[in-house]
Image (cartoon, rainbow, N blue to C red):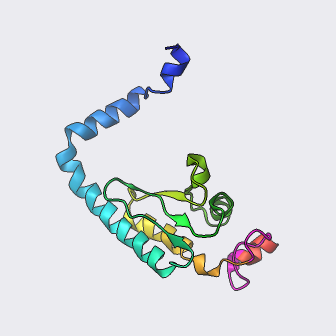
């Protein structure tokens, strides 16, 4: 194995120390983060239920990452516009060879997660997708995009 190739499978010292600390203290860490992950997953589930005609998911059974998908939209274009116009950053599924999906972490403070979900909740206003306008005319973001 070449040294460069082996670097792909290593982590930095700081990452190693954080992981070690987490594993050694999992009994203290799990209750806090487990609770916020459940709360955030519930928040995301409610968003998806409200927008079931546009978005769906296979709800994760464990972990702190969800991978919802758009039923008809290109996630890469949506993700670019979302971060530019709202500051919400999710990873497009195209990065994982899963077009239409996007990756979102559930492991953040619930107040911060709720703010991001509120911005994602503009999904029902999406129209003219792919024609230079991401959100409907009633959206304040649409006015910024047009300008």
Q: Which residue shows up at 66% across the image and 62% down it? A: 74
Q: Which of 121 and 92 is in front in this view?
A: 92
Q: Which of 65 and 40 is in front in this view?
A: 65
Instruction: Specify the segment rendered in magenta.
Output: 128-141
Outermost residue, top side: 2
Residue 89 as seen in the image, left or right of residue 144: left
Give percent across and percent down for residue 92: 59, 55
Residue 73 as seen in the image, left or right of residue 114: right
Give percent across and percent down for residue 112: 44, 64
Residue 138 as seen in the image, left or right of residue 95: right
Q: In this view, does 56 lie above or below 64?
A: below
Outermost residue, left side: 27
Outermost residue, right side: 147
Main secondary structure found in the magenta portion: loop
Give percent across and percent down for residue 2: 53, 13
Q: Which residue shows up at 57% across the image and 62% down it? A: 88
Residue 136 magenta: yes
Residue 103 magenta: no
Q: Quadrant of the C terminus?
A: bottom right
Residue 7 as seen in the image, left or right of residue 138: left
Q: Nearer the viewer, residue 44 or 24?
A: 44
Q: In this view, does 54 lie above or below 79?
A: below
Give percent across and percent down for residue 30: 23, 52
Q: Which residue shows up at 53% across the image and 20% down it? A: 5
Q: In which quarter of the image is residue 143?
A: bottom right
- How many numbered marks appear? 0
Q: Which residue shows up at 52% across the image and 78% down it? A: 51
């Amino acid at each position: 194995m070449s040294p460069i190739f082996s670097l792909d499978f290593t982590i930095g010292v700081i990452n190693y120390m954080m992981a070690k600390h987490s594993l050694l203290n999992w009994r203290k860490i799990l209750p806090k983060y487990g609770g916020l992950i459940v709360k955030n997953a519930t928040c995301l589930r409610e968003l998806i239920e409200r927008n079931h005609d546009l978005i769906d998911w296979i709800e994760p059974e464990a972990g702190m990452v969800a991978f919802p998908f758009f039923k008809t939209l290109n996630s890469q274009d949506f993700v670019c516009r979302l971060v530019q116009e709202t500051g919400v950053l999710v990873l497009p599924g195209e990065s994982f060879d899963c077009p239409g999906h996007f990756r979102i972490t559930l492991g953040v403070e619930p107040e911060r997660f709720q703010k991001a979900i509120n911005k994602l909740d503009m999904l029902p206003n999406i129209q003219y997708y792919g024609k230079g306008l991401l959100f409907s005319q009633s959206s304040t973001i649409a006015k910024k995009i047009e300008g």
